[in-house]
Image (cartoon, helix red, strand yellow):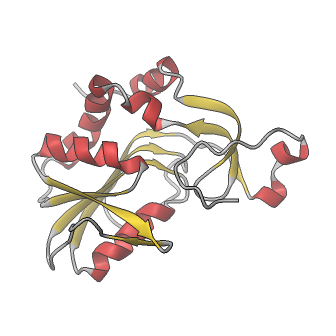
Amino acid sequence: MNLTENDVLELFNKTKALLSGHFLLTSGRHSNKYFQCAKVLQYPNYNEAICKNISDFFKDYEIDTVICPAIGGIVVGQEVARQLGKKFIFAERENNTMSLRRGFDLKEGEKVLICEDVVTTGGSVFEVIELAKQKKANIVGVGFIVDRSFGKVKFGYPQHSTVKMEVISYLKEYCPLCKEGLELVKPGSRKNLK
């Protein structure tokens, strides 16, 4: 049985993975909500149940490899690949460019599913899409846990999320939370944001 969107949100709340405050997102935008997926995915049974929603959606697609951007997508991509019985690799930034390291590679025509934990603007996923295109791989879809854009971000391939929630985010110059003087917190993995 797949978890419903409400079931997934309940797991986020149960594990205190849905945070409220003043946050600097990986996109560089500010928000009053933050999905700290690592807090819910630290429990293997929750990770398995949430990722089953993604793997079930893509189970009838022809997939050779699951790929994700590091670091947030790694736990998601690994579990989806395990459930689908497919190879798993990840891309990471080197000199501010998403690249394949550690001996990972994609072959021309390789069918890839891209996975991620949270999508706000889709920046990291778009970078992995571009990397896969450069390698002449065939992108079959994009699966992710949280769609903060409520379906506004379109990748141009079949896509599926377990939760769609419109969470407002602001450019820093228009952020009302900054104007209120609330402390800005950077809980994500990318360190070179301001």
In the displayed structure image, the side of residue 81 where residue 169 appears, left or right: right
Image quarter of residue 140: bottom left
The percent position of residue 177, horizontal first and vertical second, equals 82, 43
The percent position of residue 187, horizontal first and vertical second, equals 60, 42
Quarter holding the C terminus is bottom right
Q: Which residue is drawn at 21% across and 68% down?
A: 103
Q: Which residue is drawn at 58% across and 55% down?
A: 26
Image quarter of residue 67: bottom left
In this rendering, is residue 35 above or below 173? above
Q: Is residue 31 visible?
A: yes
Name of the residue lying farthest toward the front: 102
Residue placed most toward the observer, 22 or 55: 22
In this rendering, is residue 84 above or below 53? below
In the displayed structure image, the side of residue 108 where residue 95 appears, left or right: right
Q: Residue at x 37, y 32 (%)?
A: 41
Image quarter of residue 84: top left
The percent position of residue 40, horizontal first and vertical second, equals 42, 28
In this rendering, is residue 51 above or below 12? below
The percent position of residue 125, horizontal first and vertical second, equals 41, 62
Q: Is residue 5 visible?
A: no
Name of the residue lying farthest toward the top: 14
Q: Which residue is drawn at 54% across and 46% down?
A: 148
Residue placed most toward the observer, 131 or 170: 131
Quarter holding the N terminus is top left
